[in-house]
Image (cartoon, coloured by chain):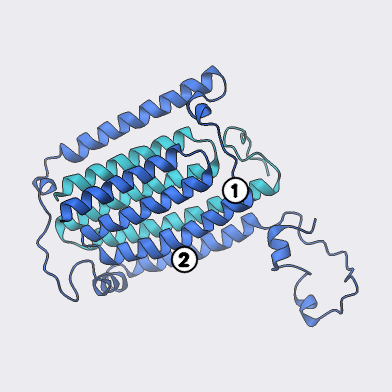
Amino acid sequence: MSIGWYLAVSAIVFALGAAGVMVRRNPLVVLLCLELMLNGANLALIAFSRMWGNGDGQILALIVMTVAACEVCIGLGMVVAIHRRRLPIDVDELRELQG
Amino acid sequence: MSAVLFFIAGFGAIAGAVGVVMLRDPFYAVLALVGHLLSLAVLFLLLRAEFVAAVQVVVYAGAVMVLYVFVVAYVGGREEPIGELLRGRGPAGAQLRLGAAVLSGALLVELLIALLGTGLKAVSGDGAPYAPGPRTFGTPAYIGQLLLTRFLLVFEAASFLLLIAAVGAVVLARRRGGIDDDGDMNGRVPTPLDLVRPRETGTMAEGVGTRR
């Protein structure tokens, strides 16, 4: 398969993730959609890495996965903290950043 | 053979992504993401990224998704009505959401034009020549060598980032208001451990906040 096909899949996944981030209201699902966007970028990175026969893109993809894991960690911690405070789990309702 | 596998895995990846965006129950959205990640791992394998595919399955589809499932089970993620997904609340919200959907469609078109209309000749090719071997492109040995030589600083920075994120998650999700040190031991014999740390810190009771 030519590399272009992989890039097309990665673009579709990225756009779907962007749509989810903008449309969904549950912060858990917003985090999931962020993962989708990162995965789309990862697929493009690995496709380009294959295109040049160079491992640098794969290293970058691994680092992106690390950053995604950190983001999940912090995001889920915030969701749990919101839940503890009996606030609605809804990004439309959470308008204020007061402690 | 690889073309058939590509179309199966690519379809799975896109279907999983659609599922994440469209499914109402956050729990099903997490399961759809697991399917998406597994399909993506197959695509990585087709691109000769064996190590990254293995990490994707073990770390991502395994560990990170377990974290998600636990939080969804704990928070009991609220279902949002599918009609409200695009309607939103009030006319302004509806327009904003519709605008967001249109915007992401435009983003897709732009990305496809940028990626496929590129002048790079190699995009329409099969990529660099590949010869199987113990230390070729994409094997764990190759990735490990790169990580510990050229990308050593990046590797260390990533590990430090993970440490900060772990500490940050504990700080964010801990009980606010601290541990109530009212001093009553409920007839329990004090142990030396009580001197070192306040009661019930670092226990499951603190984690789930049953003591209020």
User: Looking at the rendering, which quadrant does residue B103 occupy?
Assistant: top left
Above or below B86: residue B19: below
- In percent of the image, x 31 and y 58: which residue is there? B41
Q: Nearer the viewer, residue B37 or B212?
A: B37
Give the percent coordinates (x, y) of residue B125: 10, 50
The tint chain B carries is blue
The residue at which mark 1 appears reads as A79
Q: Which quadrant: the C terminus of chain B?
A: bottom right
Residue B80: image location, x then y, percent: 56, 35
Q: SS for tag 1?
A: helix
Name the residue at 24% across, 72% down.
B142
The residue that label 2 is drawn on is B160
Q: Secondary structure at mark 2?
A: helix
Quick one: which residue is furthest to the bottom in this view?
B192
Q: CA distance from mark 1 to mark 2?
A: 23 Å
In terms of image quadrants, where is residue A20? top left
Mark 1: few, some, or many residues within 10 Å (few <14, many ≥20)?
Answer: many
Is residue B59 shown above or below A21?
A: below
Q: Residue, x 58% and y 53% (percent of image)?
A: B71
Is B128 situated left or right of A90 in this image?
Answer: left
Q: Is residue B99 above or below residue B15?
A: above
Colour chain A is painted in: cyan
Q: Position of residue B160 (x, y in %)?
A: 46, 66
Locate the N terminus of chain B by quadrant: bottom left
Q: Evaluate whether label 1 is on the same chain as label 2.
A: no
| Type of the residue with mark 1 | Val
- Amino acid type, residue under disc 2 in the picture: Phe
In this rendering, the count of numbered labels is: 2
* Depth order, front residue of B117/A13: A13
